[in-house]
Amino acid sequence: MTLEALSPGALLEFWKDFIRGPAHLSMVIGAPSRPLNLTMSDDTEIDLKSKILHFSSCSFPVELIRRFLTLPEFKNLKRKGNWLQSRICVSEVLEQARSLGIPPERTALSISHTEGASVAVMCELGLVRAIGVDLESTDRVISQGVTRKIMNEVEKKLFLLPIQAWVIKEASFKANPKNTHTQISQYQITSAKMHPHFIEGKVDCLDHSFEYRLVIIKGNDDARYFLAVAQFCA
């Protein structure tokens, strides 16, 4: 399916009528325009009962800090750069959650990054029980062997490219609260409705169903990226 590419600045308009509840999406392409600023205040506390870590500007659950904001050791400088780039997106969506008055314990968060671009998406838990995002270059080639594993004959009739199916399923996998018990091949795309700027539909996996939306984002120079967001609703 052919889509018209969007600029990163136009992204938010395409999620407002999709994500069911207050949400925010942040994307960084190329060199970050600002440094990561998540310094802890002098009176930082860890409340073990509520598992909240207090920062000078915001409070985040310890689980979010450990999962998304704890800097690991990197031997590869490119990987470290990708990590820092994606965490700028994380800090932006968490700050937006704070400004919207969403409690940290009711914040769902997902991130993805590929060479040259990173994205994070946040929403308030409620109707949406989990959210997932995936990002890949449109130049990435999915081998025939992998395609056979991730796309069945029914899905091939939806006229999705293998890389589009991969990104949709990865986002759905991340949106599954029980994804540790599943594999990408178990996620079946059951519908794919084409619009000028996006594709949307549903994905099923065992007893879970997910809604997704996929777009193409313009990057620097001639770079293009497939971006998919999936949500698991109550």
Image (cartoon, grey):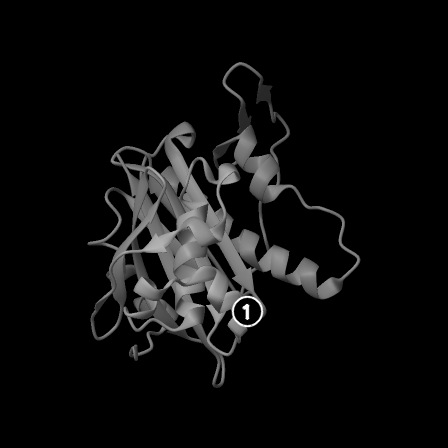
Q: Taking 229 as reference, is 64 above or below it?
A: above
Indicate whether 27 appears above or below 39.
Answer: below
* Quadrant of image for the N terminus: bottom left
Q: Where is residue 36 in the image (x, y as percent from the top left)?
A: 59, 53
Above or below, 79 relative to 145 = above
- Relative to 98, is 43 on the left or the right? right
Q: Can residue 221 be seen in this view?
A: yes
Q: Which amino acid does label 1 sit on?
A: Gly
Q: Where is residue 129 in the image (x, y as percent from the top left)?
A: 33, 35
Question: Which element is circle 1 on?
Answer: helix
Label 1 CA crowd tier, 10 Å (few <14, some 14–19, many 20+):
few
Image point (65%, 41%), residue name: 70
Horizontally, is 211 left or right of 136 in the view?
Answer: left
Q: Residue visible at 25% across and 72% down? A: 197
Q: In which quarter of the image is residue 158?
A: bottom left
Q: What residue does disc 1 label?
A: 145
Closer to us: 191 or 151: 151
Question: Relative to 140, is 128 on the left or the right?
Answer: left
- The extreme right residue here reads 75
Residue nearest the observer in this picture, 177 or 131: 177
Task: Give the farthest residue toward the bottom.
Answer: 222
- Toward the front, the furthest residue is 153
Q: Nearer the viewer, residue 20 or 177?
A: 177
Tell me if residue 57 comes above or below residue 15 in the rendering: above
